[in-house]
Amino acid sequence: MESFYRTHRYLVEHVNTRVHRQLMREINWDDRLIGIKGSRGVGKTTFLLEYAKQKFGTDRRCLYINLNHFYFTENRLVDFATRFYRQGGRTLLIDQVFKDPDWSKDLRSIYDTLPELQVVFTGSSVMRLKEENPDLSGIVQSYNLRGFSFREYLNLMTGSDFPEYSLDEVLTDHASIAAGILQKINPFDYFKDYLHHGFYPFFLENRNFSENLLKTMNMMIEVDILLIKQIDLAYLTKIRKLLYILGQNAPCVPNISQLSNDVSISRATVMNYIKYLKDARLIDLLYPVGEQFPKKPSKVYLHNTNLMYVLQETVDHQTNCETFFYNTVHKDNKVNRGPKAAQFILNGNQTFQISAGQTRLRSNPVQWQVVDNLEVGKDKVIPLWLFGFLY
């Protein structure tokens, strides 16, 4: 047990987050069982350690553990939690919970037998905490940690403390919000860099970002898809090839029959793998209003713009703008395919046309126009960068 405390102390003392994640304020920390999902590389470990540092410091009532430790190959999580609780522990932070094959049963047992112990755990974005784990039904509160928003990236790079805005606030008051931000910084000094490498926090590490992201993407497939979904390793190359084909052409209308031939798997398997790639947050699927999986999507986008610079030889400006918009509004809104020139419908009733430039800048009483390279908008014309302040 002491070795875990030493590791915890070292990690907490050395965690250094210069920007506070929006999710930290959204979580109800009074809940006894909290699950935090997120794709690989978005900072789940740092998030746990930052919470420990803010709330407890090095107080032994809180302990961070990672279930990839070899100790847990022969020792059950529920037994470890019981020992920790008897020694005065009250908050157990568990990283990579899926590494324990009995994790959901153990968490249920901990919840039932140790009523004064709070457990906060992280898991992969492909996990369905409630749907696939009946042991946790009704007792776990689940949250999603996303990559950096443009707002969080700006706060980090400039030392600012810009607040987030709701979609309604952006739509109704975008001109004054943008003007207020522009009085302090010029967002265009940072926007292109964010699109290239700002979504994943590991851009702060002293390593080649593209190579690091490429490794992370492979880990998403090898661990978050194959391991958790229990897919045979022989299919690894097929899933990687499918992602490559989709990624090179995104946003694209998927031809399932052609993909089936190209990857040498059945049409049903193609659709399943597309769903897994979405759950891993490597791609996003766009459907018409009223449709959803398992129907074929209208379009496949990459999950965020950073992925485009790894999978595409030439990144199209218009595609970049659409991908950024889809990614940032998707957090709290239902996003569907828009009619004709409007690429998106939000929440079933608001249409948005995304434009990479101002050549077609014209107010439209029916739909919103979202325009890149625009500092401040007017009426129903809004600058693209401002949607990066939604979280």
Image (cartoon, grey):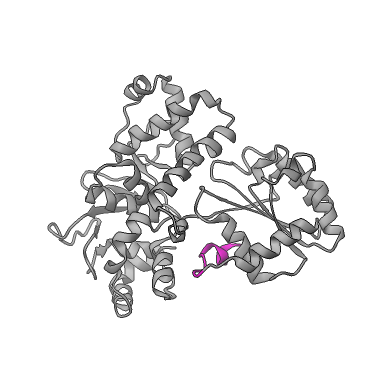
Question: Which range is magenta?
Answer: 18-31
The image quarter in which residue 151 lies: bottom left
Horizontally, residue 162 falls left or right of residue 308, namely right
Horizontally, residue 237 falls left or right of residue 375, namely right
Type of secondary structure dominating the magenta stretch: loop
In which quadrant of the rendered image does the N terminus lie? Answer: bottom right
Picture residue at 39% right of the left edge, 58% below the top = 198
Numbered label tally: 0
Find the residue positioned furthest to the right: 86
Residue closest to the eye, 189 or 372: 189
Task: Decide if residue 30 is in sight here.
Answer: no
Horizontally, residue 261 falls left or right of residue 41, namely left
The image quarter in which residue 362 lies: bottom left
Horizontally, residue 316 falls left or right of residue 276, namely left
Query: Vertical placement of 334 versus 239: above or below?
Result: below
Estimate the x, y position of residue 387 in percent, counting from the top left. Answer: 34, 62
Picture residue at 49% right of the left edge, 69% below the top = 19
Task: Decide if residue 287 is in sight here.
Answer: yes
Find the residue positioned furthest to the bottom: 183
